[in-house]
């Protein structure tokens, strides 16, 4: 192998990840076994040490000295705690931590990857026992893999990670979006608009499929893009209008952008008769835009949103939404994290929690 950091005699120094592969265990378990901390079964410890000897692995003494013992604390790294989804998920994480006799340390990273990287660095310096994180990027996850190499279990919330062997707690975003749009199509709507929040560095790319002339979407497997896929799949299944002008993207950190993009849909020469808002930010934006423009819901525009927040049931009309339980997702993520902290060593698992379509008065037949 080509030389790199720590290379000797033209060969790369074996890493914890190399030892984990050789031993057939997770990186977190290999890190604990090599660092002599945390809970590791005797047979796994022996397997890891034998693999390390075969590879000529030499431990990083500085890193090992920083983790002489656990701190009975875990970290929760949230994309934006002002978003009700993450506030509810945090409650679920904290409840489980307290049941286990641990404290939870919260980091809010404002949807910024650089802030997330720093949050992980700080948590490792604090000798955290494990981390639940809703990662900003699903493709740039080197900092999370490095945490695993230090023996710190990582559980992903609401996202899965490319090439990362970690548990993730998610919903089936594509299926949930499909069902939401299918509900509108079953009511007779054929011009259905979409408003979705995306991140600039992993923005979906719309394209026209050569075989059908209908819209397709490319992009990393993150919730917003999977919901676009579900929207387009429903349009295809019902042979409904598939047009770029009916799809609007907004950025979470752009104040008023969701409302502006929804208003742009309503300002079309032939506006949609129904709108699917693919997250709680765009749901509020679409509802507000219709109110300000004087568009009556549902007689002039049916609306399906995402996330069953309190306000969606209190407004007139109450909003039909895709309901998920972020508190249950937070609890599930934390429960899985503590199983890893206690030594469970199966491969990372994608745990899919259910959603339901809560039908209210904001949708009506065309």
Image (cartoon, rainbow, N blue to C red):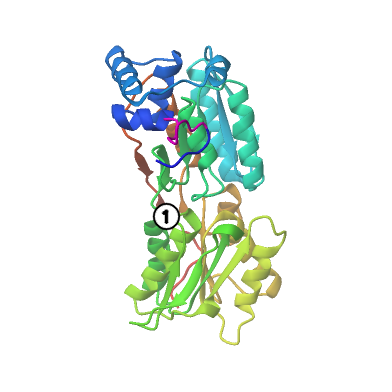
- Quadrant into which the C terminus falls: bottom left
In the rendered image, residue 10 lying in the magenta stretch gets the answer yes
Label 1 Cα neighbours within 10 Å, binned few <14 / some 14-19 / many ≥20? many
335 or 285: which is nearer to us? 335
* In this view, 294 is above or below 288: below
- Residue at left 46%, top 24%? 151
* In this view, 272 is above or below 357: below
Most common SS among magenta residues: loop
Secondary structure of residue under mark 1: helix
The boundaries of the magenta stretch are: 6-14
- Quadrant into which the N terminus falls: top left
- Residue 140 relative to residue 226: left or right: right
Which residue reaches farthest bottom?
Answer: 269
- Residue at left 64%, top 80%? 267
In the rendered image, residue 330 lying in the magenta stretch gets the answer no
- Residue at left 36%, top 42%? 350
- Across and down, in percent, residue 60 comes to 51, 21
- Across and down, in percent, residue 311 comes to 61, 51
Give the labeled residue for mark 1. 173
* In this view, 210 is above or below 77: below
* In this view, 16 is above or below 303: above
| Residue 272 seen in the figure | no
């Amino acid at each position: 192998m080509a030389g790199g950091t720590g290379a000797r005699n033209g060969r790369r120094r074996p890493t914890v990840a190399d030892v984990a592969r050789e031993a057939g265990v997770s990186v977190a378990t290999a890190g604990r076994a090599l660092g002599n901390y945390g809970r590791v079964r005797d047979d796994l410890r022996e397997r890891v040490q034998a693999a390390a000897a075969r590879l000529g692995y030499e431990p990083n003494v500085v890193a090992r000295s920083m983790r002489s013992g656990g701190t009975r604390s875990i970290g929760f790294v949230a994309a934006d705690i002002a978003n009700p989804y993450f506030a509810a998920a945090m409650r679920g994480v904290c409840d489980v931590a307290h049941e286990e006799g641990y404290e939870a340390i919260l980091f809010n990273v404002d949807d910024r990857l650089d802030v997330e990287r720093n949050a992980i660095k700080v948590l490792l310096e604090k000798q955290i026992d494990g981390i639940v994180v809703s990662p900003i990027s699903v493709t740039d996850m080197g900092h999370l893999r490095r945490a695993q190499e230090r023996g710190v279990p990582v559980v992903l919330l609401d996202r899965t990670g490319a090439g990362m062997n970690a548990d993730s707690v998610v919903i089936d975003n594509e299926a949930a979006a499909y069902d939401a749009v299918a509900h509108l199509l079953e009511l007779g709507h054929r011009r259905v608009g979409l408003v979705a929040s995306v991140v600039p560095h992993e923005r979906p790319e719309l394209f026209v499929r050569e075989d059908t002339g209908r819209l397709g979407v490319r992009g990393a497997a993150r919730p917003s893009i999977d919901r676009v896929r579900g929207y387009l799949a429903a349009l295809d299944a019902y042979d409904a209008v598939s047009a770029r002008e009916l799809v609007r993207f907004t950025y979470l950190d752009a104040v008023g952008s969701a409302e502006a993009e929804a208003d742009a849909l309503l300002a079309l020469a032939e506006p949609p008769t129904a709108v699917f808002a693919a997250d709680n930010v765009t749901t509020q934006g679409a509802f507000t835009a219709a109110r300000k423009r004087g568009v009556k819901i549902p007689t002039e525009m049916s609306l399906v949103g995402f996330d069953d927040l309190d306000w969606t049931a209190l407004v007139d009309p109450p909003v039909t939404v895709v309901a998920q339980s972020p508190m249950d997702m937070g609890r599930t993520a934390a429960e899985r994290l503590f199983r890893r902290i206690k030594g469970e060593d199966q491969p990372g698992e994608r745990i899919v929690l259910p959603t339901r379509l809560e039908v209210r008065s904001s949708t009506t037949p065309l």
